[in-house]
Image (cartoon, rainbow, N blue to C red):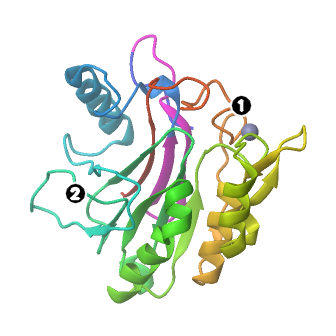
Amino acid sequence: MDAAVGPGSSSPFYANEEVRPGLRVAFTAASAGNLALHVGDEPEGVRDNRRRLERAMGITASSLRFMSQTHSDRIAVVGSGGVTAAPDADGMVSPRGADPLAVLVADCVPIVLADAGIAEGGTGATAVVHAGRAGVSNGVVANAVRVLQSQGATDLAAWIGPSVCGSCYEVPEAMMLGIARDIPAAASRTPSGTTALDLPAAVRRQLALSGVMAGEVHGAGSLCTLENPALFSHRREPGAGRIAGLVWRT
Ligand SMILES: [Zn+2]
């Protein structure tokens, strides 16, 4: 865990690990503040939170790339020095890993992907993906893997961050059955026996079908956004904010 980022402030991270030499994967906690511009918070406050996060990550100010997420299946390829506006996409690839990437969630599944580093003979590519119920259905995870592979990645690994778990995401039976028809791993039940969706299990299966194993993330408390008050959950508190999944090379 990284040290506190300022007087009186706790760590902004739920988890923050060097998962490979020179490659860091992190997921923020609610202590990082809301990082999304679209949930009604004053934009300057969100930008302050983003600046504080960049300092805690140890990266250049304004270098962290965000997406304009719409539950689409689109993947944007971003490059250093180009347009810095948030692309209209739900997955984002940095072909050499030069750009620090962020994905915002509050119950949906944040996924980080990375190829082996350039020193290990890989492309160094990194990616983030946003997959909620729509993303699990539309194949955005497989799309991201395809884009990475089309850029030359051959040694991909993935990390799945905090999201609503399969015990908490209650949905109507018809919805569960409709999604489970294509992705059986998505079928789940709440403790009271009602139908639910297990989005992280579905994403893990989709990654495996694309030939990518998902690594573990070791955070503080439950990985379920709804059960862990240190994380933001849209279902628990609509509009409270978004946490970020992050990947960057050091
Ligand atoms: Zn849960």
- Residue at image mark 2: 87
Asked whether residue 49 is in view, the answer is: yes
Dot 1: element: loop
Report how far apart the C-alphas of labels 1 and 2 lie in the structure.
31 Å
Above or below, 218 against 21 in this view is above
* Residue 242 coordinates in the image, percent (x, y): 44, 34
Looking at the rendering, in which quadrant would you find the N terminus? top right
Q: Residue at x 9, y 58 (%)?
A: 83
Above or below, 45 against 47 in this view is above
Residues in magenta, as a range: 7-27
* Residue 18 coordinates in the image, percent (x, y): 52, 55
Res 93 quadrant in image: bottom left
Per the rendering, the mark at residue 227 is 1
Crowding at label 2, few (<14), some or many (≥20) Cα neighbours within 10 Å? some
Q: Amino acid at mark 1?
A: Glu
* Residue 70 coordinates in the image, percent (x, y): 35, 52
Give the mark nearest the N terminus, 1 or 2: 2
